[in-house]
Amino acid sequence: MPRRNTVVLAVCLAAAFTTLLDQASLNSAIPALRDELGAGPATLQWIIAGYSLTFGLAMVPAGRLGDTHGRKWLFVGGLTLFTVAGVVGATATEAWVVAAARLTQGAGAGIVNPQVYGLFQDLFTGRERARALSAYATVGGITAVLGPLVGGAVLGAAGGDLGWRVVLLMSVPFGLVTVPLAIKFLPGGPRPGSARRTTLDLPGLALLAAVTLCLLLPFVLPDGPGLPTAAWPLLAVAALGALAWWERRYARTGRTPVLMPELLRSRGFSLGTLSAMFQFGATLSANLVLVLHLQDGLGWSPLRAALPLIPGAIGFALASSQSWRLVSRFGRAGVVGALAGSVLATVATLLVVRTVPESGLILALSLTQFASGLAGGLMLSPNQALTLAHAPAGAAGLAGAFLQVSQRISATLATAVVTGIMVTDDGVSAGLAICVAMLIASTACSALDLRTRQPVTAPQTVP
């Protein structure tokens, strides 16, 4: 690997650590934040799910802009926005300000993320690309270990009010270090041969946001006068129809729509994206269900509640670091096997929380979470590599954004649903059952992709 590519990879991994540490540590701080600021269920759902919403919606235009105008300054601007919003959220005195800061942080992270995937597509090919994606996933595993552990320790040492503020500030120093490194080392210009004029399909993006919001709002709006619950799915269907009509019309003009036709027509890309979508939402939701159950349902401290989650993060990091070997040897079949393992591990977790006495929960959950982490680590980056291999040349950032936006929409809806279940009633069984169903759907999509002819090599792009 050329030395410059190694440095760029290091900067991308530093950005991943900055944004993912914040996300990994926040769950442990939710009960304290709720108690200290008096946040109601709807506000909590915006704080948790809103981040994924703006993350996903920012990714498509950011990916398109990065493909055509260069990735460096979008990377820098997004990470700066993320860091500043973290300070705003940590110093807030009202719960709605924290929610607004989280929405802004989601947008910042959503601007950064497609630049990372685009750089991986631009600078690496074949096995090196799979290893870069594996390293990125490994960093996610490391932050998943540190986030709950450090967050729980901070809350235990600093108390509720100061503790959640420190948790929101933890990623700020890393952002302040990574931004100057990105300015110095990231390649600055657009890819050679890329078009200078960019079309963002803002109406398509607005309609996609409308579809997502119509599905999300029934779970986050407070009870009271307003549209009946049954009206929101009907509005979502109407918005989806309008989106399909507009995207066909927009594509006929020769411009690139949000739902890029070449990607939608690719069986391998579509099924890989659906598989990633269901798995990502299920994984985030399962962790959230366990944290809320252990803290609110059983009255555990944040640090104690974090302990059984740590083996899962360790398993994820270990498996991610070697997952490129899985994709090299088994391809899509390895992903299917890993997803089947995730289903079994989540079912085991559901059985443990319903049958094991509280005195044995830490050990039993540690085992099921370790198995779940191993399976997730073996699935994530191989699925990304196999899916993005179907992206047409010159659309690496948009393809990565399309993949990620589906995951974030899934996470937005799934975390909103399970948060609503958990904050109104300790519905741990229902929450985990939803996660099992999503993982089964992910496994089915990946299994359907077994017959898809995989590209001989990943798309070649010019560094």
Image (spheres, rainbow, N blue to C red):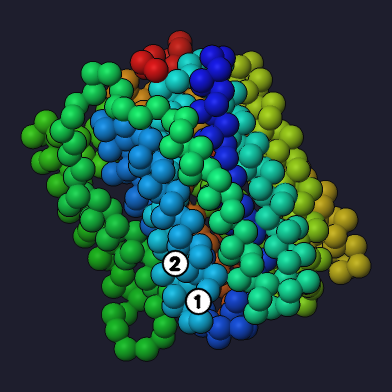
Quarter of the rendering occupied by the N terminus: top right
User: Number of callouts in the render?
Assistant: 2
How far across and down, in percent of the image, does residue 116 sit?
Answer: 46, 35
- Answer with the quarter of the image where residue 357 lies: bottom right
Residue that appears at 62% across and 59% down: 170
The mark found on residue 101 in the picture is 2
Residue 190 visible (yes or no): yes
**In the picture provided, is 203 more to the left or to the right than 293?**
left
Residue that appears at 70% across and 40% down: 316
Residue that appears at 66% across and 76% down: 162
- Which residue is at the front of the view, 139 or 383? 139
- Which residue is at the front of the view, 172 or 63? 172
- Answer with the quarter of the image where residue 261 lies: top left
Residue beneath disc 1: 92
Q: How far is the residue under mark 1 from the one under mark 2?
A: 9 Å
Q: Give the structural element (helix, strand or loop) at label 2.
A: helix
Residue 130 visible (yes or no): no
Q: Are marks 1 and 2 in contact (CB under 8 Å)?
A: yes
For badge 2, the amino acid type reads: Ala
In the image, farthest residue toward the right: 359
Note whether 376 is above or below 151 in the view shown: above
Quarter of the rendering occupied by the C terminus: top left
Label 1 Cα crowd, 10 Å radius (few <14 / some 14-19 / many 20+): some
The mark found on residue 342 in the picture is none
**In the picture provided, is 443 more to the left or to the right than 387?**
right
